[in-house]
Image (cartoon, rainbow, N blue to C red):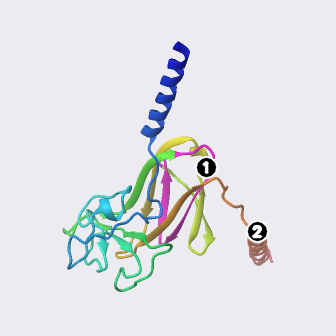
Amino acid sequence: MKTKLILLLLAVGVAFRGLGQGTFFNLNFESARVVLHDPQFGWLDWSLAAPGWAHSSGSDLEVIYYGQEHFGVTGYYMLYDSVSPVYAPGTQLAGLYSLGFSSGYASSSGGAPWQQNYLSQTGAISSDVQSIRFLARGSFAVFVGGTEIPMVALGSNAYAGDISAFADTTTDLRIVNTSMELHDPLILDNVVFSATPVPEPSIMALVVVGGLAFVFGCRRFG
């Protein structure tokens, strides 16, 4: 009886430890609920439009724009779907929704510093994970556990990066818009932690790179 009790307590402890680690949520932005709290501008609450995601703080960043364009020199976050934004409807990358965001000045006051805005989550990465993959359009950098992850372009707005070193850990994921231009959004979708490794460069790509190196070498020494 004592042995069974100990085993039960251990099982409960493991369960609660797993719950405490947390899990990543709404990585494809399909949990969005479009509930306008400002009919004129279409602003959305973060808790409804992008549950699970943390974000930069600052002027104009406490709401998610929907439909209408953001004006001014600050950054913004916007939900993209078949009708939003009005100047480019249907520009989401997959499914019903994508989330886009731009960098900008920290406020509209003169002399405000430039601020590179981000999306982030903290959660458990399973032991079999080899790569992070997502769809994106725009300029970005990816950080896992504070370490920048080199990303490989796979074509058709798809990217992958090796995060095998973070398998079986609970850590922070942060995706930053690195553009230094106003109103230059990074549109993001379908973030996945995958058991598939990042693909090696294709043979054709290596042939092209090798050929270019040969040509430049001939020009240099010819």
Question: What amino acid does circle 2 point to?
Answer: Leu
Mark linked to residue 169 = none
Q: Residue 129 got which mark?
A: 1
For the residue labelled by badge 1, is the local secondary structure a helix, a strand or a loop? loop
* Amino acid on which the number 1 mark rests in the picture: Val
> Image quadrant for the C terminus?
bottom right
Relative to 123, residue 150 above or below:
below
Which class describes the residues within 10 Å of circle 2: few (<14), some (14-19), or many (20+)? few
Report the Cα–Cα distance between label 1 and label 2. Answer: 27 Å
Q: Which residue of the protein is positioned furthest toward the front in this rendering?
A: 1
Q: Which residue is mark 2?
A: 206
Q: Marks 2 and 1: in contact by CB < 8 Å?
A: no
**From the viewer's perspective, is residue 29 above or below residue 167?**
below
Q: In the image, what residue occupies the spot 44% across and 34% down? A: 16
Magenta extent: 125-146
Which of these two is toward me, 178 or 135?
135
* Label 2 residue SS: helix
**Total marks placed:** 2
- On screen, residue 45 versus residue 212, left or right, reads left
Which quadrant of the view contains residue 192?
A: bottom right
**Residue at left offset 47%, top offset 64%:** 28
Q: Nearer the viewer, residue 103 or 220?
A: 103
Image point (74%, 68%), residue name? 202
As rendered, which of 170 and 83 lies closer to the eye?
Answer: 83
Q: Residue at x 78, y 68 (%)?
A: 203
